[in-house]
Image (cartoon, rainbow, N blue to C red):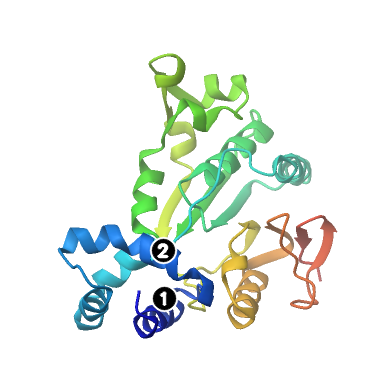
């Protein structure tokens, strides 16, 4: 890919999503947009750039961001986070709380918000509560996968057998089996497209917990700072922010307190 074209595409991607791409990502960007170029019948990257610049609808930008977005996730990823979430929900229930709000920011193909839903359902037992999970991603393509809630057998290998029986409908057997999320979990979750680099967000909160794991690594300092400010605004006093195990908020915020590796609390009062 021509360097000048690459630089323009990188700037568009950053302006529209906050995703930062370094100079060594030329091969990755070229490979990711190649499929879209074939769909459009475009052979040169400079012609594809022209398509983007001349598209007044903004639809091609969405296709570009879909192509660039990395979606790597799995059920019960970083399981200690969900063990802690279950403990927190149990404690909040014992304190009399009956309304819960959670947010999976950068939900990818849905494994994270569905895991949150199953964790909370397990914690609540027979208690009657009002819980909602907001799940957002910038990729329209991946959100369609979320809404289907269908996963091949290898995708659910880390899900406990009891959960597979309780929260999934299985079609077929063995390696060809398909697992569908049951409505008891699906109805808890609202999936929406959201660009995390554009603040303020339309939500009012307060949120009991926000999961934004392995997402901020794609953002520069300015975008991360604005994003964290919004998380702080939306969290309730005593609410929790979960980030990826490889991420740290050191140097970004002083109003969140680290209580566990990659877990932060917004202090009450």
Residue at disc 2, secondary structure: helix
Q: Residue at x 61, y 49 (%)?
A: 99
Q: Which residue is drawn at 39% across and 51% down?
A: 142
Q: Is residue 56 visible?
A: no
Percent position (x, y) of residue 43?
A: 20, 68
Question: Where is the N terminus found, in terms of image quarters?
Answer: bottom left
Q: Residue at x 31, y 72 (%)?
A: 61
Q: Which image quadrant for residue 151?
A: top left
Q: Residue furthest front?
A: 2
Q: Which residue lies furthest to the left in this view?
A: 41
Residue at disc 1, secondary structure: helix
Query: Real-space Cα distance between discs 2 and 1?
Result: 8 Å
Q: Residue at x 26, y 79 (%)?
A: 46
Most foreground residue, 109 or 194:
109
Q: Residue 192 carries which label?
A: none
Percent position (x, y) of residue 205?
A: 58, 65
Kindly identify which residue carries mark 1.
13
Estimate how packed mark 2 is, as few (under 14), some (14 to 19) or many (20 or more) residues with alpha carbons within 10 Å: some
Most foreground residue, 227 or 182:
227
Q: In this view, does 132 lie above or below 32?
A: above
Most foreground residue, 163 or 188:
163
Percent position (x, y) of residue 86?
A: 72, 40
Give the side of residue 197 with respect to residue 9, left or right.
Answer: right
Kindly identify which residue carries mark 2.
68
Question: Where is the C terminus found, in terms of image quarters?
Answer: bottom right
Percent position (x, y) of residue 120?
A: 63, 39
Q: Is residue 183 above or below residue 176?
A: below
Q: In this view, does 118 lie above or below 39?
A: above
Q: Is residue 148 visible?
A: yes
Check whether the beta carbons of the residues at disc 2 and disc 1 lie within 8 A of each other: yes
């Amino acid at each position: 890919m021509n360097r000048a074209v690459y630089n323009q595409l990188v700037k568009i991607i950053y302006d529209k999503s906050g995703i930062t791409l370094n100079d060594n990502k030329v091969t990755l960007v070229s490979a990711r947009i190649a499929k879209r170029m074939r769909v459009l019948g475009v052979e040169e990257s400079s012609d594809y750039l022209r398509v983007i610049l001349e598209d007044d609808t903004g639809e091609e930008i969405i296709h570009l961001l879909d192509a660039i977005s990395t979606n790597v996730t799995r059920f019960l990823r970083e399981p200690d986070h969900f063990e802690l979430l279950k403990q927190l929900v149990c404690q909040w229930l014992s304190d009399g709380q009956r309304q819960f709000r959670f947010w999976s920011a950068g939900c990818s193909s849905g494994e994270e918000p569905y895991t949150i839903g199953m964790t909370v359902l397990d914690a609540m037992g027979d208690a009657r509560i009002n819980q909602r999970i907001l799940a957002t991603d910038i990729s329209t393509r991946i959100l369609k996968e979320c809404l289907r809630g269908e996963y091949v057998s290898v995708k659910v290998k880390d899900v406990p057998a009891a959960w597979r029986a309780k929260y999934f409908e299985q079609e077929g057997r063995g390696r060809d089996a398909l697992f569908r999320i049951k409505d008891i979990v699906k109805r808890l979750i609202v999936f929406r497209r959201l660009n995390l680099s554009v603040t303020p967000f339309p939500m009012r909160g307060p949120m009991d917990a926000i999961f934004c794991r392995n997402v901020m690594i794609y953002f520069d300092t300015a975008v991360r700072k604005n994003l964290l400010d919004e998380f702080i605004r939306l969290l309730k006093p005593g609410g929790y922010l979960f980030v990826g195990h490889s991420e740290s908020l050191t140097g970004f915020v002083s109003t969140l307190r680290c209580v566990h590796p990659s877990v932060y609390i917004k202090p009450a009062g």
